[in-house]
Image (cartoon, rainbow, N blue to C red):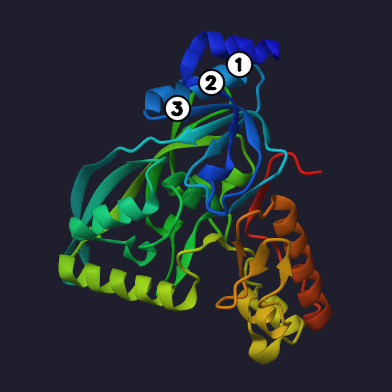
Amino acid sequence: MNKQYEKMKKQFGEQLRFNEPLAPYTTYKIGGPADIFFPASTRVDFVHVITTARSLHIPVFIFGGGSNILVADNGIRGLVIKNNTSDIAIRGMKGKMKGENEERLVYLEADSGVHMNKLVRFTIEEGLSGLEMHLGLPGSVGGAIFMNSKWTKPKGFVGDAVYRATILAPDGGMRSVDKYYFQFSYGKSILQKTDDILVSVVFELVKSDKEKVWKHANESISYRKETQPQGVHTAGCVFKNITQADAISFHTPDHQTSAGYLLEKAGCKGMKVGSAEVSSQHANFIITHSGATASDVLTLIHTMKKTVKQKFGVTLKEEIQQVGEFT
């Protein structure tokens, strides 16, 4: 056993697992093992195991809800932490004038391991508006912030509701940062470029009528169910939409920016590689069946990308994150 891994084992004992299969933790249900694996249930454990691994120069990967990622068949080297932190708490509120009316702002903190669907339902039940369009979003708060997850009807990004956050810096220090630190944009946050790790987030939400918030949430999730595959193994949209500038430059039909539209018109629906296939409902989703491998999915991604490039001249960019040791 690697000497650094042995040092981790001495500190964390049976909590630490070796060669842990990661497929069960992903929404694709595929992928190889983690060298070492640790399920963190509290912020204290989460921060402690990260700082310990970093002090030993062991690579760290944080696992949230397992969506939006493709884990390599060879697995992930180093430490994989399953972030199971789960605290949600209202931290304060204040009034703000909006026109002639007073708007009540509520500040709610959530651990980075909280499932987004759990958080959204909590906010709706509290009559808090700002996240309701994300009802049904898979994954964790940490993943949603990392990717600045979006929804289209009505359009909204998770980052829009961020007020402040607590991050763990590479030097082991805890820092409080405001929303501008994240440099949110479509599918992006600064966390994709730094070694900072999100510990918790404070969202700024608006006190509203609970029934109205539920109405908007149900409209969003109904549209999600109508347009996206349900009850199957998928990790979400494979590719990002293109920019309006690219749509104009490449003369896409009606200047369409939707990656799903371009994939469908290029004939990608129903494409198969091994036990992975493009959804017949939405061409920007790959579905995996029993026996599928990460290699199947990766080959299919390359084929889809090449097909759209040949049809429209557009090079799609992946939204799915590839993690681990790919050959």
Residue 46: numbered disc: 3
Pointer 2 with pointer 1, Cβ within 8 A: yes
Number of residues whose C-alpha sits closer than 10 Å to that of mark 2, classed few (under 14), some (14–19) or many (20 or more): many
Residue 236: numbered disc: none
Q: CA distance from mark 2 to mark 1?
A: 6 Å
Q: Is residue 153 at all visible to an observer of this figure? A: no
Image coords of residue 221 (percent x, y)? 36, 70
Pointer 3 with pointer 2, Cβ within 8 A: no
Q: Secondary structure at mark 3?
A: helix
Where does label 1 land, which residue? 55
> What amino acid is found at the position of numbered circle 2 in the picture?
Thr
In percent of the image, x 38 and y 28: which residue is there? 43
Foreground: 1 or 193? Answer: 1
> What amino acid is found at the position of numbered circle 1 in the picture?
Ser
Image coords of residue 118 (percent x, y)? 32, 51
**Total labels drawn:** 3
> Image height check: is 298 above or below 65?
below
Question: Which image quarter: residue 62?
Answer: top right
Where does label 2 land, which residue? 51
In percent of the image, x 45 and y 36: which residue is there? 83
Position of 31 with respect to 327 (left or right) is left
Image coords of residue 252 (percent x, y)? 71, 86
- Earlier residue among tags 3 and 2: 3
Q: Secondary structure at mark 1?
A: helix
